[in-house]
Amino acid sequence: MRPTRWMPLALLLLTPAGLRAQNVKSSVVLDAMKAEMARSLEHFKKLPTPPYFLSYEVLETEEAAVTGSFGALLRSSPASRQRILSIDLRVGSYELDNTHPIRGAAQIAMDILNTYPLPVDDDPDALRAMIWYYTDQRYKRAVEQLISVKTNVQVKAAETDKAGDFSPTKAETYSEPAPPPLVFDRKLWDDRVRKYTAPFQRFGNIYSARASISAERNTHWFVSSEGASIQTADTAYRLLIQAFAKASDGMELPLYESFYSSTPGGLPADDAVLEKVSKMTKSLMALKSAPVMEPYVGPAILSPRSTGVIFHEIFGHRIEGQRQKREGQAMTFRDKVGQLVLPEFLSVYSDPTARMYGSTELAGYYKFDNQGVRARKVTVVENGILKNFLMSRVPIDGFPESNGHGRKGPFYNSVVGRQSNLLVVASQTLTPEELKKKLIEEVTKRKLPYGLYFEDIAGGFTSVGRNEPNYFEVIPIMVYRIYPDGREELVRGVDMIGTALTAFNKILAADNQSAAFNGVCGAESGFVPVSAGGPGLLFSEIEVQKKPKSQELSPILAPPFDDK
Amino acid sequence: MPVTTPIFSLPWSTPAWLVLWAAVASQGPIDDSYDEIRRQLWLATDSAYKTALDSYAKKKAALEHRTRQDDAPDFSHEPVVNLEENDPPAAWTRQEAEATVKSLSAVFRQMPGIDSSGVRLNGQRWVARYVNSEGTSYVRRGTFVSLQVNADTQAVDGMPLADYDVMYATSMAGLPPRDEMVKRIRALASRIDSLRKAPLLERYTGPVLFEGQAAGELFFQALGGALTGVPRIVVDDARFEGVYNNNGGLLTKIGTRVLPEFLSLKDAPASRDFNGQPLFGGYQVDDDGVKAGETELVNKGILKTLLHTRALIPNTTHSTASRRGPLTSPSNLLFTADKPLTAEQLKAELIRTVKQRNLEFGVVVRRMSNPQLAVNLARSRVIVFSSSSGPGSLQVEPLSEAYKVFPDGHEEPLRNVTITGLTIGDFRNILAVSAPSTVYTAPVRIISRVPFSAVGFVQPAGPQLVSATVPSMLFEDMSLDRPTGDIPRLPFSTHPYFDK
């Protein structure tokens, strides 16, 4: 692909969005979806078990990505496009339908991961033929499922939650122009990933250093038997730099920097990236010689970015609607609405309509969720009191409607309540210096040698079922000991662990800073982009355990360029 | 499964670094960056050396207290080879490929009997470079194009019917001309369509004639992978002996008869064509850098040896140049038949056997599905399972084109036929064959893996295909049956395109 061909497209971006012509091609897909839906519903009418609800969702993704390693190109491919169809076909009724969980049986993977490729050409005949073919398969499966559901409900104990399986919603009609063309200058990008990873070459003991730039251009079409007709569009540009070094005891020390923007111009310029790279190499070298941290429990400060991640894990996943419904779920907060669940100075919002958090663009932004429900800001906790859950169209007792949080990743079929942009807001704050002072007070009061400061975190995971302890684990990458005299010392080799309810009781204070973490969240409905942000927090107690460690020693020979 | 799935969130593709250490050896840069290639080789070598030391120590420790019966050396001496192949011209363009699949798949717009179809074109251009400490080096290059057409529908009783056609070439220009491809697609579609009303076969045991493609595919599935041998691995925990050394296959059959005495077979990786038809399984040197030659596998029915790599099997001294990626694989399998019959004579022989045994009819098979190529024919494979078989019998794919042959010579189509109770021994009882005249090319499933002598060798150089010149084969006795699984219902509505 000649890069020059893409130049005018880049210029087009400068035109205001309103002036861009609506993409005529896109409606071909929507029209084919509508036509085939109407025809299917007409045929279904004649059957003994007609569906009471049917929706089609088509996601078109055009993506391009390049990856470099130590100054050389590892992968680079031209932009490619694909379309994926998801079908939600329900037989039975809003109260009880084929999607009702069957207790005592494992869910069949085919029912969860069940999406279908569609032609990328705007050819209505080809599109409709595939939609017909897959609808037929889904219908047969749905009828089969409903029979199992009805039997299961009769032979098992009564369920805690009496709300039905699906809630009606307003049929939305919305259409926005096709997303701006993908800005992908392959040659330029190839050069950028080479440039970003070249500085790592100088360090023989950095064993992996990669930079990837990716661009994604998505169009979403949604139609339902209730009359919804939605077309939305978005673009996403990402830059990820990751590297790892090894300590002399074999421990792998990873670091990364990631950037997200909805526009190519929103990614940082070369100078800024190279500055980050230089900081990464310095941090890696510092980590290599940092002392190994021992298991510890004591006061700790979480940086604002770290707060986002820990709230996402220990709190965010427990306020997802279906977690208060399914019998195997821990239902931590089911009966806590109206009660104090966090310190009074904290409020928590899930706001998919928020684009920015300070100067950070949020990845959890969307206009409609995957069930055609308009996105809205949800106040989850106000002054410490639990107010609401993140609802998909699966209702729960007391929360009969969706609030626009029904989400799923590509290739997944089932939609559940998921997080979007989880924002923690503090009404009383301290300066970072005051927060550190308070930490030292705690340390001194409890006669501990030091407290901890978590500066950066890579991610985490948590368990929300009843069959296992409700632990969480967060993977920090930059952790410091803070001594009573105020001295800070970088340490390595620990993971943060704990259980959810205990952790909430340990929050003492928040600072007046804020930062957001953009990431991908994986759960039962696949991987979705999310953000989480908040202030720095002081916990009276955080527990850390030793990190799993590689048993591989450093290479026997020195790096080849040392021989020159 | 919300109950057991731990929920986790990680930044963009962060899990990648968890596997980076392992992947270092397998993914090199696509830039010609001398420093980066050296750096990756350095790490891969270090990892390979540590792995080798570890397994060598384990092996020596295990042999301290055992007497080994298999005394084949671990690695053969081979002559030094230096080879550099020329860069082939580009084999395809994206525009050309897209235009081809679009126009070919449009043929199905005239085929109302087909529910779903797809045309898939794959093009690749590859280069493999190799050096070893003995001085052998190669640069091998190639291009390859494959075009597969899939079609599926349901018979009048709902039973799934699916089939494919596949074409291979080294470039787009090497594929059949467009009008021939269209003709083949029409033939595929009408073959499936005509089977929709064809009767099912109720349990049959008797003579079966496998012609052309069906003979090739049956041989590939039953014996193709079994013609390879791997050495016995020294397993340090004897309880797992059976797990690691479960691929003896035909090793114990060497020196005995596996085919009728009028059939001989050789593996010929150096051959490029057969009577002007291209062979796709060949190469000048294998992935170990061993020069391709010719290996006599079966002489007048007697199994002589098995294909192997530099990891020797008993009673061998040299590699048969059969390494392709992590596998030992046949390349080009060339049959020779002593007393070949013509196609007409074979059919006459089938009828003679039918009459002799007072059967109502015999069966001729013209197409058989390939397990790897049929992967995309999802519907039929998921829903209808083939019949169960007896102990020691081979699981083979269903037959996609078969006919009853009556004593007067007329034929009637059959659908959804499966083979039951097939064993390797059935090949000894082949009554007669034709002269091998056509080349059949397909992927062959090989279960046994060569023990790794080093990190790497993950990707084979070029497409993993086997070509064969297989004769049509008349089997004395074979059991056929209809599928026994549940049958899906017909679609609840008609195809939208043909609903006008």
Image: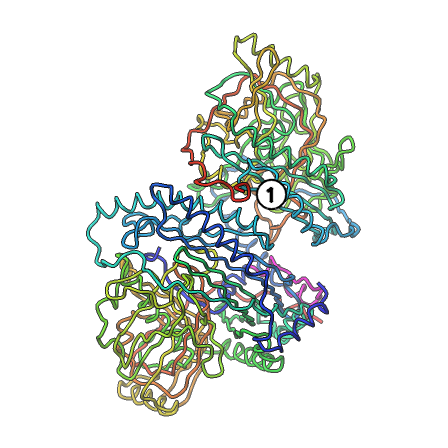
Q: Residue furthest front?
A: B500
Mark 1 packing: few (<14 Cα in 10 Å), some, or many (20+)?
A: many
Which quadrant: the C terminus of chain B? Answer: top right
Q: Is residue B317 left or right of residue A245?
A: right
In percent of width and height, residue B92 lies at 73, 51
Pick the front one: B453 or B271: B271
Q: Is residue A489 above or below residue A122?
A: below
Q: Position of residue B344 (x, y in %)?
A: 68, 16
> At 29% from the left edge and 61% from the top edge, which residue is drawn?
A395
Residue B351 to residue A87: above or below: above
Pick the front one: B464 or A412: A412
Q: Residue at x 33, y 63 (%)?
A: A463
Q: Quadrant of residue B451?
A: top right
User: To which chain does the residue with label 1 belong?
Assistant: B
Tag 1, which secondary structure? strand
**A495 to the left or right of B98:** left
Residue B131 place in picture, x, y as percent: 71, 53
Residue B136 seen in the figure: no
**Whole-percent x, y for residue B335 in the image:** 69, 27
Based on the picture, tell me whether residue A331 belongs to the magenta stretch.
no
Q: Is residue B481 left or right of residue B337?
A: left
Pick whichever, A528 or A43, lies toward us. Answer: A43
- Above or below, A390 against B140 in this view is below
Question: What is the three-letter code of the residue carrying label 1?
Answer: Leu
Q: Is residue A459 left or right of residue A383?
A: right
In this view of the protein, can residue A419 be seen by the observer? yes
Q: B51 or A67: which is nearer to us?
A: A67
The residue range painted magenta reads B23-41
Residue behind mark 1? B327
Quarter that holds the N terminus of chain B: bottom left
Q: Quadrant of residue B164?
A: top right
